[in-house]
Amino acid sequence: MVDLTCRAKSRLLCSIALVLIVAGGCRTAPEPEPEEVRGPTVAPEVGEPEATGEPPKRIILFIGDGMGLTSVAAAAYASGSPLAMMEMAEFGLNTTHSHEFVTTDSAASATALATGEKTHFEGVGLAPTGNREDEEDEGMHLRTVVRAAQERDYRTGLVAPVRITHATPGAFAAHRYNRNQYEDIALDMAGYGLDLMLGAGSQYFEDRQDGRDLMAEMEAEGVRIARSADEVREAAGEASRLVGLMHERDMRFAATGEREMELKEMVEVALEVMDEGDPEGFFLMVEGAYIDWAGHALDGAGVVSETLDMDRALQVALEYARGREDTVVIVTADHETGGMDLIEEAAAREYLEVLGGEMAAFETTVPEGLTEEERELFEAPFDFVEIGEGEFGPAGGGQFVTSFGWFSPASRVYADGGRRFSAMHTPLVVPVFAEGRGAREAAAVRDNADLGRLMVEWIDGEAGVSDQEVEAKEPSKVIMIVTDGLGIGALTAGIYHFGDLAIWGMPTVGALWTHGEEGLIASREGAWSRLVPSAVLGGDSERSPTVVTLEGSVALDGGLGEALERSGDEERLLVVMRAGDLGALAAEFDDGERYLAELVRVDRAVREAVEFAREDGDTLVVVTTSGDDAVTVMDNHYGFYSNRCGAAVECGGEFEVPWRSVALGSVHRGDGLNDEGLQGEFTPPRIALQYTWLAQAARQAGGEVRSARAANFVPLFAYGPGAERWSRVTGQAEVGGWLREWSEGGEEER
């Protein structure tokens, strides 16, 4: 077996110096012909609970840089236990696009979280602009949640295991045109009045081109300075203001065991400093930075270890918050990196056999002409990861395989030695986990800028939280729509291609794991039986509902409306609809046209169901999927602007990317997607589907293979009485268990 893990001494190099850049200049893809299929552009209206209660006064925000929902799934399976974030009270999903591009970078996305406003790609705390000179105009400086907190005399702090001037922490306390202006960002941060900066990057404060020693300047103002872990520990119980930068640039990866201080301990120190003097409130941001770096390296095992590292730190914050009534803990990501999927071991081995074995498959992604030293810097774009022994996962244990979106590994072979090569970010919607005061409101938003705005408004006293107990009324009617292949990738493609999907407009969102006792990847029939047990369809108790089942194309071609019209007078009604064969289209490696057409047919049925439920007032609509088929999304900018696009015809490769249009004017918080001035040659925005590398590479090698069924967590959406029960992470079997109990009359209305 190929050694798929970096040696400890080279782990850092594998991620931050991964050779090289793609050969040749790149151009954006030609505009495709307009598609005939167009979906709904107006989401159904949903009610919002009264939010007049006191907002949280202590806000702890965790940002898993590059952490998609699949990163969470991979870490949970590897540990054998549900993660701390999975057990938080509320769950949501957010879009992450920057002002002008569908796929963001960390700076623009962190700015949205820090200010509630979108900015240009690579901008830090600055309104979107094409001119660096604009950073000198204070009118262009976006007001951050840190500044809002300081104006209320709240304490403020930032924690990251990388340089504190990096894109994500920098966005909370700097206002610069480009994220790479590290010394300028350090200058801003040193003068921002933060009570805590904990991490690395001392060189940008004291080994500067302008000769200034910002560490000494801060120390003169009463800030405690620490340059090692021991000095940080010593200061933690004494200092009211602390800057602890424990490495001149970036700390080490968690997997090396050589990090100066674990993120968990950094959070312990941070909370001690934040709580000093029992302030009225505080804002604390903690970044799990290396999840992204591992994703760029196509290092699935690294994604797992870094996600677990952040989750351990999160547990510290949750223990703190659970002892208070004024605190909220929020976990999200700035974007997803790499388009990672979890593939069953047996399927992965089939694909690798087509490619000539593990070593041969790995070699197809390595450029020619490299030195041995350069070759050692490459990770294989797949990792075999053991399923942990514990309560979470299939009974038989075994392994899963991480495989990234096809375009990045396929393009890496074109690297020519100019610079490091790294995998692309994707625009996949990212998870939001929340617990504590205001958790429901935090999970309810659908875009990262909305989440940022909510936090600012909480601190300003312009937004409250709902103190109302959620009414526990059970529905008298249930519409269960189960499609196949509606994973996070399909959902993201629909959001950007069609605009506001009816599915995306449903007020409650959850996530489901799809494994069963029989294995990590269940059959479609196995998943179906967990979601809708046979006993539900054949119930014979006195309170059993009238059951209407709809399948196939008929269900999507007006069948739901007809069934609801015929059954409208039933006191107890269950409509189960099994339709939307996205999985079959993925298995054909569809170029996106028929795939998206099928998606919008599903969405029209969802709209019909929600409109019925709104008028009826006593109907619950639940929409989910039997599984994910390893479909992710890319855009026509991120991989092209930095020459990560070698596989594309436009960049010297052989692959013609099947671009699809973006619903300009219909994407929520997407006004800047029309900004041709900032987009330059990458206008208009485009998206394309990509499939997991293992499957698509085997297909292109001539193998008769189908796309991969993935063990990724999948979304669930709900509307109506009882919908709030699903705003969390749970399993398909629990959905089926509740449905069976309801159908048997086990839960009386109350």
Image (cartoon, rainbow, N blue to C red):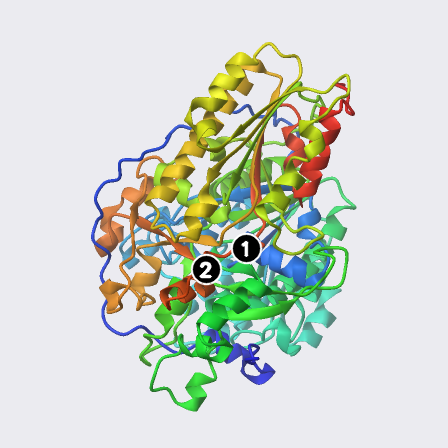
How many numbered callouts?
2
Identify the secondary structure beneath mark 1.
loop
Q: Indicate the quadrant containing the C terminus: top left, top right, bottom left or bottom right.
A: top right
Does any portion of residue 700 appear in the rendered image? Answer: yes
N-term-proximal mark, 2 vs 1: 2
* Nearer to us in this view, 268 or 259: 259
**Residue 471 image label:** none
Vertically, is 323 above or below 600? below
Residue at numbered disc 1? 710
Residue 478 pos. (x, y %): 62, 24
Identity of the amino acid at label 2?
Thr
Vertically, is 117 above or below 355? above
* Nearer to us in this view, 144 or 555: 555
Query: Which quadrant holds residue 22?
Result: bottom left
Does any portion of residue 17 appear in the rendered image? Answer: no
Identify the secondary structure beneath mark 2.
loop
Vertically, is 359 above or below 455? below
Is the residue marked by circle 1 packed among few (<14), some (14-19), or many (20+) residues within 10 Å?
many
* Nearer to us in this view, 660 or 471: 660
Residue 646 pos. (x, y %): 30, 69
Name the outermost residue toward the top. 569
Real-space Cα separation, disc 2 to disc 1, in angstroms: 9 Å
Residue at numbered disc 2? 692
Disc 2 to disc 1: CB gap under 8 Å: yes
Residue at horizontal 32%, vertical 74%? Answer: 414
* Nearer to us in this view, 361 or 370: 361
Query: Relative to residue 440, is residue 652 drawn left or right?
Result: left
Query: Which quadrant holds residue 546?
Result: top right
Residue 597 pos. (x, y %): 36, 38
Identity of the amino acid at label 1?
Ala
Q: Indicate the quadrant containing the N terminus: top left, top right, bottom left or bottom right.
A: bottom right
